[in-house]
Amino acid sequence: MSAPRTGTVRVLADRDVCVGAGNCVFADEAVFDQDDDGLVVVLVEEPPDGDGVRRAVQTCPSGALRLIDG
């Protein structure tokens, strides 16, 4: 079993790469939303490090999301 994560991460989103699948919103709606065109909007640029935000990055089909630990 891994240790619980603490601290925050920085979320980077490349809207030019986003395909509007919405996986990020399903994974963590407190951190991600979509605009009227369906493209990712980062609501919290430095959210607490957690499973939802990491799942959003991992399941992004276009690779538009990145996390920077710290």
Image (tube, rainbow, N blue to C red):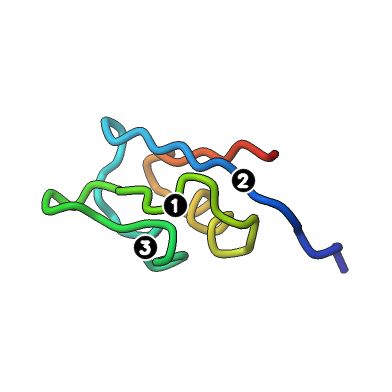
- The residue singled out by tag 2 in the image is 9
Crowding near pointer 1: few (<14 within 10 Å), some, many (20+)? few
User: Residue 25: which disc?
Assistant: 3
Q: For the residues marked 3 and 2, what is the alpha-carbon distance in whole angstroms?
A: 17 Å
The x, y position of residue 56, in whole percent, is 48, 56
In the image, taking residue 65 as reference, residue 52 lies left or right, namely right
Q: Nearer the viewer, residue 45 or 60?
A: 45
Q: Which mark is residue 52?
A: none
Q: Name the residue under label 1.
A: 44
Residue at 25% across / 55% down in the picture? 34
Q: Which amino acid does label 2 sit on?
A: Val
Q: How many numbered callouts?
A: 3
Of the two numbered discs 2 and 1 on the same chain, state the one appearing first in sequence.
2
Q: Which of 66 and 19 is in front in this view?
A: 66
Query: Between 61 and 68, which is closer to the camera in this rendering?
Result: 68
Q: Position of residue 42 (x, y in %)?
A: 37, 48
Assign a secondary structure to mark 2: strand
- At x 30%, y 48%, the residue is 40
Which amino acid is tagged 1? Val
Q: Which residue is at 39% across, 47% downward? A: 61
Give the position of the C terminus as an image quadrant: top right
